[in-house]
Amino acid sequence: MDRRYLVGLAALVALGIGAVAFATVWAPQASSPGSEQTYPEGAGPDHINFSALDADETNVSHAPRAHWDSYAIVYDAPPDRRLVEGDYYINSATGEILADRWDNATVYRNGTTYAFLQPADSLPEHQREQFSSDPLFVYDNATDAYYRYDPHYGQIAPTNIGRHPDILDAYTWTATNRTTHHGVPVITYRVSGERTTAADVPPPRNGTLRLGVEDGIIYAFDLTLDADEGTYRYTYDVRPAPFPDHGWVETARGLAAANESAA
């Protein structure tokens, strides 16, 4: 072979090796966790005690505020697993919470203030009658919706906020790596079986979850279960998101005030 081609081939091989080495050094790496690594209270390389995680006074409506200006808590369950409240949006600076409810309704909470919006066209007829006869709700013809506003509703926890990950407690988990979730350090766990103390639950087909290293918050999970009727998939994600427009809260306040004056 011509010596010029041999030199050129050697240079290409060297360049290729260098490129691979560079990519290996600079590519984002997820480290493998071990027993020597730091874990949040209640967790380890081959176990998660969800009760212990809940006992440290950090929760998903407060802890992520340190990371993002506003964020969403998004949950998806099989269609027949209907929930009162599903997705949440939280304003980190004010603590305001917006929650999506069934029938396209929206709930707003801020301290003791509570507001509710229910589009009328999303309701079955019998439920429209219930809303119309309930003095706590005011119908607005301009928007074809029912509103409720109460500035002294009380400091309450939304129905399901922080409870979506409860399904994970029926299964065992093993740490696989450490990475980040939208900039938050997390440990990734993979489902490894069923807890012996759990009630009769569908066996897991596959699943992962992401646990906050510093706060013990479940930031995400994706769990598929084998049931008699087929597979059930549950997904959950806590992620940065804009706080939705909520001008309707002022509409609810005005309607409530006018209704009280009329009474």
Image: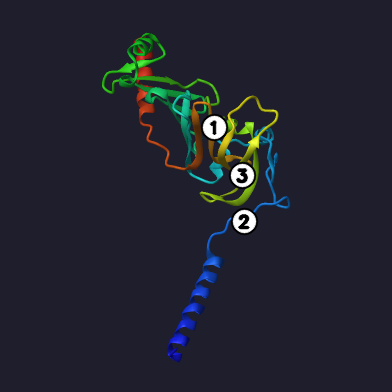
The answer to whether 105 appears left or right of 157 in the picture is left
**Residue 115, percent from left and from top:** 43, 24
Q: Which mark is residue 189?
A: 3
**Residue 76, percent from left and from top:** 47, 33
Q: Residue furthest bottom?
A: 3
Which residue does the numbered mark 2 point to in the structure image? 31
Q: How far apart in space, not on screen, are marks 1 and 2 (Cα)?
A: 31 Å
133 w.r.t. 235: above or below: above
Q: Nearer the viewer, residue 12 or 111?
A: 12
Q: Residues within 10 Å of mark 2 (few under 14, many from 20)?
A: few
Q: What residue type is labelled 2?
A: Ser
Q: Which of 13 and 58 is in front in this view?
A: 13
Q: In which quarter of the image is the N terminus?
A: bottom left
| Quadrant assignment, res 51 | top right
The answer to whether 79 appears left or right of 171 in the picture is left
Tally of numbered tags: 3
Tag 2 secondary structure: loop
Q: Quadrant of the C terminus?
A: top left
